[in-house]
Amino acid sequence: MLEDVFLKKLKDEKATIEKYLKFYLDSLHVPGVLHEAMEYSLSAGGKRLRPFLAIAVADMFGKPREIIMPYACALEFIHTFSLIHDDLPALDNDDLRRGKPSCHKAFREDIAILAGDALNTDAFSLLFEFGEGNIKKAGKYFAKAVGGRGMTLGQVYDCTIPENERTVEKLDFINYYKTSELFIAATAGAAAWLDAADEEIKALEEYASNLGIAFQIADDILDITSTTEKLGKKVGSDAALNKVTYPVLIGIEGAQKAVEERVLKAHKALEPFKDKEGAEIFTGFGDYIKNIMAKNN
């Protein structure tokens, strides 16, 4: 099964990614408690999906690892920053992250905010200080994924959507900005960093757009069906915060069907890469998202 190929490769790459994350963070020479808080959250575990996808893009295009690693690790800096801020009392108010106290619980709320700010900004330091890719071409994907046209915008819509606008279409809009944008940066952006052809970049953009939404829907399902022990964070938080999710709008079965439909669209977008070695990793990621719900409830 391609899911097994994906999971084995993901596991094999994790130690390498974590070694580079530590190297880049230490190379920035951030002092004191700020470094401690950044390292605490950056080393808290997780699957490292986003840097892994960037590495998989480099492998598929036959490019050396050294070129993609600053970009890949910068993605994880951004993802970690978003998790620190998501967990804050003003947003999701989660005390656990990956089975450990959230950053604001391990340190303080003010330190957590500032650690997130530092990871966000220093992600760009990795690109400018260590990167040798096409910064201008990739930068539009990377920066857009983070700011007022990406993750941050998605979070604002998620926090402010009124009851009478809670539709599947609006939820897709939110999930695209909240989740898909960073997956797009990890795939299409990585391809742009490596100077891939425009049509190849666009194909990966379409792939990641659909996979990101599928991933978020699956996460929303697990928030209802899984356990705190399996997820490493408190379940039921979406309902407690009255958040709009696919299971709320169309039920768990409808949400599972939506995941399958999005994964199918993502797989179709991979057609230009059918003859490329390494493309099976991206199909395997889609299969993993489809099957993760059954394995975590």
Image (spheres, rainbow, N blue to C red):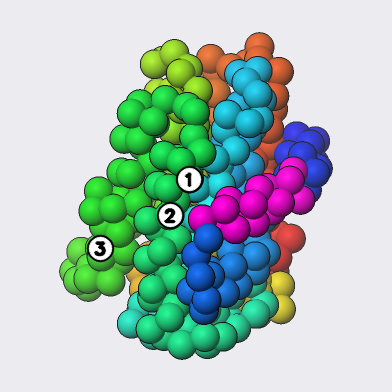
Of labels 1 and 3, the one closer to you: 1
Instruction: Give the answer, above or below, for where 85 lies relative to 278.
Output: below
Q: Are the residues flagged by discs 1 and 2 in contact, CB closer than 8 Å?
A: yes
Q: Secondary structure at mark 3?
A: helix
Q: Quadrant of residue 270?
A: top right
Q: Is residue 56 above or below residue 36?
A: above
Q: Quadrant of the C terminus?
A: bottom right
Which of the 4 image quadrants contains residue 232? bottom right
Find disc 3 in the rendering and name its residue: 157
* Residue 157 rendering spot, x and y as whole percentages: 25, 63
Which residue in the structure is indicated by mark 1?
126
Q: Which residues are magenta?
A: 13-28
Q: Position of residue 238 (x, y in %)?
A: 44, 76
Residue drawn where x is 51% and y is 38% of the image: 130
Q: Secondary structure at mark 2?
A: helix
Does residue 204 appear in this view?
no
Looking at numbered disc 1 in the image, what kind of residue is underneath it?
Answer: Leu
